[in-house]
Image (cartoon, grey):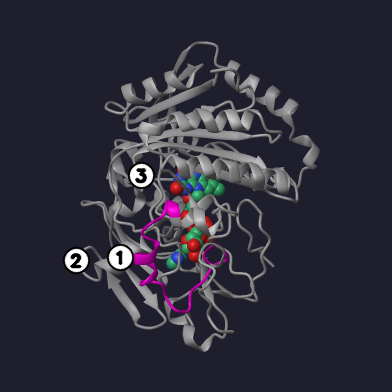
């Protein structure tokens, strides 16, 4: 049977029942189910927002039909289990692109709305939810409710970034973005200090639609933080302009021995990654998959962390407290944890309608760690304190361990959000951060 894990494979969680959905008409009456319910998209969330231990998981991947695509206006309506990959296959040949995309195309529209995902163009376009016009939400207490900024606005705002807790999104309609083709003009710039990263980011935002940086978190030194800043724009010319480029042949990850990931192997990997670009600035035209989804080329790469899995810690702090990024990196450098991958970006000021949406103006850093038990959790708790002290937040879509106190401090609108919860829906994440609520079993 297909495993219903999250991407980090931590924590382990066993749903009592899996209900695969192929048609909206197949969705059971939630009130007939004796256990709490949650929708599972493609399980690309790292932590436990897509898990429901002892409950029912509704697998939405069979709700994968397109409903309407207007190639003149770029408005697309589809069922919520359609993936971003399927959408790109339909829209790119017609000259359209996703308004916002995360770093993998293997996520569903429902998942993209429920976590209100962001991408490399946050400084221009905000989050995915900002481009959603309307959706149909199936509630256990009201049946199907049409939600838009004009109709049922409260429920609309709560569902965007609502962590799947306001009901089942059946379908959604959103606005695409015109592009000249599938190619991206990319510039990669080496930097050696955080200050340089901030300068590059500020100088790039106006003329570049996409910006992000890879940071070498293994060779952090006194005031040193080297990395590669990447910026890009859609362009009309490519190597084979008529073909839709792809990232190359996919290889498959396996359950690697944990010993493979250590400071030495990561230092060697990062050294090669940083120095393979010998010029300070490298320019190239690349296919969209290579630019947006470099990790998708390795299927199941999450298994390379071994059976214990891994954690991603993604936080944001306001621009005026960006020194906190340095302090968190110092804390990391003084610990024994190994950060395998780290991505840095400055979010813009475009607001999302979502009540619990994570992105806000400031600097965001995402760091991956092999899960080693207490020591990894302790380090993340120390990060939490700094993030909290600096008025920041941690991203629920990537989280498997934040405390209830931290969640309430990072997302002060959670009480307002709570009034929109579907009474039959719960998740492992929600039971952890708001432990009082229970669907009777
Ligand atoms: C390699 C990689 C890169 C990533 N990069 C980014 C990034 O750049 N930016 C970013 O924001 N995120 C990023 N993510 C995280 C990912 O985009 C989100 O976790 C996304 O929400 C996963 O979608 P999914 O379809 O797999 O949903 P799942 O992970 O299965 O579920 C996510 C949430 O959505 C809810 N949900 C799913 N479908 C429905 C539905 N139909 N109705 C109601 N609720 C529903 C679930 O209950 C759950 O709460 C990345 C993940 C990976 C693995």
Q: From the image, which quarter does the C terminus lie in?
A: bottom right
Residue receiving disc 2:
150
Q: Is residue 107 visible?
A: no
330 vs 195, nearest the viewer: 330
396 vs 307, nearest the viewer: 396
Q: Residues within 10 Å of mark 3 (few under 14, many from 20)?
A: many
Q: Are marks 1 and 2 in contact (CB under 8 Å)?
A: no
Q: Is residue 292 above or below residue 65?
A: above
Q: Residues within 10 Å of mark 1 (few under 14, many from 20)?
A: many
Q: Which residues are magenta?
A: 409-430
Residue receiving disc 1:
156
Q: Is residue 219 visible?
A: yes
Left or right of 17? Residue 165 is left
**In what element is the residue under mark 3?**
loop
Q: Residue furthest bottom?
A: 32
Q: Residues within 10 Å of mark 2 (few under 14, many from 20)?
A: few
**Magenta-drawn stretch contains 436:** no
230 vs 325, nearest the viewer: 325
- Mark in front: 3 vs 1: 3
């Amino acid at each position: 049977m297909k495993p219903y894990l999250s991407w980090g494979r931590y924590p382990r969680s066993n749903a009592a029942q899996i209900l695969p959905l192929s048609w909206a008409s197949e969705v059971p009456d939630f009130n007939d189910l004796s256990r709490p319910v949650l929708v599972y998209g493609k399980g690309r969330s790292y932590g436990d927002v897509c898990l429901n231990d002892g409950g029912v998981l509704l697998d939405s991947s069979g709700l994968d039909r397109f409903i309407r695509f207007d190639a003149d206006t770029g408005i697309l309506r589809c069922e919520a289990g359609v993936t971003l990959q399927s959408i790109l296959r339909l829209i790119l040949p017609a000259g359209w692109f996703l308004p916002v995309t995360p770093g993998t195309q293997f996520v569903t529209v429902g998942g993209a709305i429920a976590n209100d995902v962001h991408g490399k163009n946050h400084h221009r376009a905000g989050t995915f939810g900002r481009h959603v016009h309307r959706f149909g939400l199936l509630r256990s207490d009201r049946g199907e409710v049409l939600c838009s900024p004009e109709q049922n606005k409260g429920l609309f705002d709560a569902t965007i970034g609502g962590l799947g807790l306001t009901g089942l999104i059946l379908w959604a309609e959103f606005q695409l973005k015109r592009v000249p083709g599938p190619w991206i003009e990319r510039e990669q710039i080496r930097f050696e200090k955080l200050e340089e990263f901030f300068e590059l980011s500020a100088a790039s935002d106006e003329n570049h639609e996409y910006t992000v940086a890879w940071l070498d978190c293994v060779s952090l030194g006194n005031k040193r933080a080297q990395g590669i800043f990447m910026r890009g724009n859609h362009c009309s010319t490519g190597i084979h302009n008529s073909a839709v480029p792809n990232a190359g042949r996919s290889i498959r990850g396996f359950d690697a021995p944990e010993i493979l990931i250590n400071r030495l192997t990561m230092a060697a990997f990062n050294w090669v990654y940083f120095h393979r670009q010998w010029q300070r600035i490298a320019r190239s035209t690349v296919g969209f998959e290579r630019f947006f989804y470099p990790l998708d080329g390795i299927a199941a790469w999450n298994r390379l962390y071994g059976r214990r899995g891994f954690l991603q810690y993604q936080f944001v702090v306001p621009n005026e407290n960006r020194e906190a990024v340095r302090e968190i990196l110092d804390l990391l450098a003084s610990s024994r944890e190994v950060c395998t991958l780290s991505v840095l970006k400055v979010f813009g000021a475009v607001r999302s309608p979502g009540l619990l949406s994570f992105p806000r103006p400031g600097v965001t850093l995402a760091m991956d760690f092999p899960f080693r038990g207490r020591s990894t959790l302790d380090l993340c708790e120390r990060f939490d304190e700094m993030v909290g002290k600096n008025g920041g937040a941690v991203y629920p879509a990537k989280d498997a361990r934040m405390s209830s106190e931290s969640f309430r401090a990072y997302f002060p609108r959670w009480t307002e959000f709570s009034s929109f919860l579907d009474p039959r829906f719960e998740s492992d994440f929600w039971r952890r951060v708001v432990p009082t609520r229970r669907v009777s079993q």
